[in-house]
């Protein structure tokens, strides 16, 4: 079929959808399908939730392009106040954006400006977006990066603990022993990276997904998260939690880092924050945002 759409968008199905409601989508032929994709972790309240639709309708009738440089509109501060209530302790100031990739790049800009350091550490299997810097930070597969080199420099990759693979490779170990081995190996890899490739004095931030999205939906063990955060605190490196996919109750708590009992310096939010509407946010402390 002839199309004017860019071929870069691949299709998993040939469904021609015209409507979505809750967990269901409807084709142009009237067939209904149960949508397990959730807009790729976006429509957390389902397609066209009545409250979301109503909020969009009301706002569209009163103010559409409410930019913030010339004047401020009335809903900015209430939203920031609400986010301050539900985000981890220490996060009280917010910057709003359009997408997860934009917010991720903004978080790295903030970290570099705040620390005066040039480098960033990411983890193997991560996905942080498809814009140029976010692409350099994405290591889940080569397809996102192929043909776009040279990518921005200053990005270094640390190992992520693969507990299941470790258990399979060491059947003699108990589950907890295999987990400990995977965590200890990954932490050693991070320390070696800081000793051999990007010195702490040159490292602005470590950014991590509490649950690898494109990297296989692998949860970062809480002990691993805490030890990474401790290493960051030891060296004045900012700890960034990329909660674009895991945020807004997708893991049972409002943010996945809550299960690790730690406080990130910066938190990145998108996708489920607006349940289908393009929106994102960066959260940090007032001191860091200053």
Image: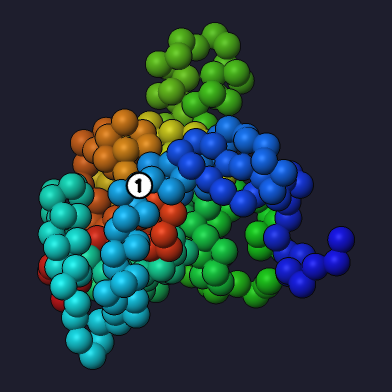
The residue shown at (58%, 26%) is 165
- Give coordinates of residue 117: x percent, y percent: 34, 73
Q: In which quarter of the image is the C terminus?
A: bottom left
Number of on-image labels: 1
Q: In this view, does 207 lie to the left or right of 90?
A: right
**Residue located farthest toward the right when viewing the structure as drawn:** 1
* Residue 157 appears in the figure: no
Q: In this view, does 217 lie to the left or right of 55?
A: right
- Give coordinates of residue 274: x percent, y percent: 35, 55
Q: In this view, does 95 lie to the left or right of 32?
A: left
Residue matched to label 1: 50
The residue shown at (27%, 40%) is 254
The residue shown at (34%, 70%) is 60
- Give coordinates of residue 7: x percent, y percent: 77, 65
- Give coordinates of residue 132: x percent, y percent: 56, 72
**Dot 1: few (<14), some (14–19), or many (≥20) neighbours within 10 Å?**
few
Q: What element carries label 1?
A: helix
Q: Quadrant of the N terminus?
A: bottom right
* Residue 66 appears in the figure: yes
Q: In this view, does 11 lie to the left or right of 266?
A: right
- What is the image's colouring? rainbow
Q: Which of the two residues, 36 or 89, is positioned nearer the viewer here?
A: 36
**Residue located farthest toward the bottom when viewing the structure as drawn:** 70
Q: Which of the two residues, 165 or 74, is positioned nearer the viewer here?
A: 74
Q: Which of the two residues, 127 or 76, is positioned nearer the viewer here?
A: 76
Q: In this view, does 256 lie above or below 147?
A: above
Q: In this view, does 167 lie above or below 190?
A: above
The residue shown at (85%, 66%) is 2
> Which quadrant of the structure image shows residue 57?
bottom left
């Amino acid at each position: 079929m002839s199309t004017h759409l860019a071929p870069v968008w691949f299709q998993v199905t040939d469904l021609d959808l015209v409507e979505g409601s809750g967990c269901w989508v409807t084709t142009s032929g009237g067939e209904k399908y149960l949508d397990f994709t959730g807009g790729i972790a976006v429509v957390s309240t389902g397609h066209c939730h009545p409250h979301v639709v109503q909020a969009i309708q009301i706002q569209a009738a009163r103010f559409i392009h409410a930019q913030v440089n010339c004047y401020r509109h009335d809903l900015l501060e209430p939203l920031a106040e609400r986010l301050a209530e539900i985000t981890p302790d220490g996060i009280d100031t917010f910057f709003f954006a359009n997408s997860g990739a934009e917010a991720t790049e903004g978080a790295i800009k903030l970290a570099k400006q705040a620390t005066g350091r040039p480098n960033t550490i990411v983890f193997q299997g991560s996905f942080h977006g498809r814009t140029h810097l976010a692409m350099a930070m994405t290591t889940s597969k080569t397809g996102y990066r192929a043909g776009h080199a040279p990518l921005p420099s200053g990005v270094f990759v640390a190992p992520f603990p693969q507990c299941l693979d470790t258990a399979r490779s060491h059947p003699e170990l108990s589950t907890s022993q295999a987990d400990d081995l995977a965590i200890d190996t990954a932490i050693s890899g991070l320390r070696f990276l800081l000793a051999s490739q990007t010195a702490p004095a040159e490292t602005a931030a470590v950014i991590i997904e509490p649950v690898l999205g494109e990297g296989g939906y692998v949860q970062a063990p809480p002990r691993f998260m805490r030890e990474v955060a401790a290493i960051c605190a030891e060296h004045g490196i900012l700890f960034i939690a990329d909660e674009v996919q895991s945020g807004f109750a997708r893991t049972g708590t409002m943010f996945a880092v809550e299960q690790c009992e730690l406080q990130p310096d910066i938190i990145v939010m998108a996708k489920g924050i607006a349940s289908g509407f393009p929106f994102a946010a960066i959260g940090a402390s007032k001191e860091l945002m200053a």
